[in-house]
Image (spheres, rainbow, N blue to C red):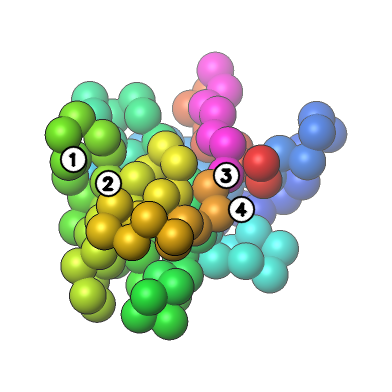
Amino acid sequence: MRVVMEKTNTQDWTEVCVLDDLILNDGACALIGEEQVAIFRTGKGDEVYAISNYDPIGKANVLSRGIVGDVNGRPVVASPLYKQHFDLETGQCLEEESVRVKTWETRIDENGTLFIRAR
């Protein structure tokens, strides 16, 4: 995957890659500033989620290598370490109510370029 990581001129959006660089239902990792961000392209290919790559339970940057799926209709990634599920929309861990990872807002422009912005 080609990672660009340039700031755009609108509200701290960071250009990350071209949508076609992302594999459907798989994860990729990008470095935004000093934070590792796990990026997932799901559904029919037009849904893109971005969450922290750091698994707070396993204490490692591995979520981009997790298994993408859904639990009761919610898009999730299962950590490759201890298999906890993290909601891709909210960052909430489904097995540990007190655990949540950071999420980023995503958008795709008319040229198919993915941008990410911290919430």
The amino acid at mark 4 is: Val
Residue 36 appears in the picture as rendered:
yes
Q: CA distance from mark 3 to mark 1?
A: 19 Å
How many numbered marks, from 0 up?
4
Label 4 element class: loop
Which tag is nearer the camera, tag 1 or tag 4? Answer: 1
Which tag is nearer the camera, tag 3 or tag 4? Answer: 3
**Is residue 67 found left or right of 114 in the rendered image?**
left
In the rendered structure, does residue 109 fall within the stretch colored magenta?
Answer: yes
**Is residue 1 found left or right of 43 in the rendered image?**
right
Q: CA distance from mark 3 to mark 2?
A: 15 Å
Quarter of the N terminus within the rendering:
bottom left
Measured as percent of width and height from the top left, residue 8 is found at 77, 38
Label 2 element class: strand
- Which residue is the site of mark 4? 4
- Which residue is the site of mark 3? 104
- Which residue is the site of mark 2? 76
Q: Are marks 2 and 4 in contact (CB under 8 Å)?
A: no
Magenta span of residues: 104-110
- Which residue is the site of mark 1? 70
| Residues packed near mark 4 inside 10 Å, few (<14), some (14 to 19) or many (20 plus) | some
Which tag is nearer the camera, tag 2 or tag 4? Answer: 2
Q: Residue furthest front?
A: 97
Q: CA distance from mark 1 to mark 2?
A: 5 Å
Residue 62, placed above or below residue 69: below
Viewer-closest of 49 and 70: 70
Measured as percent of width and height from the top left, residue 110 is found at 54, 17
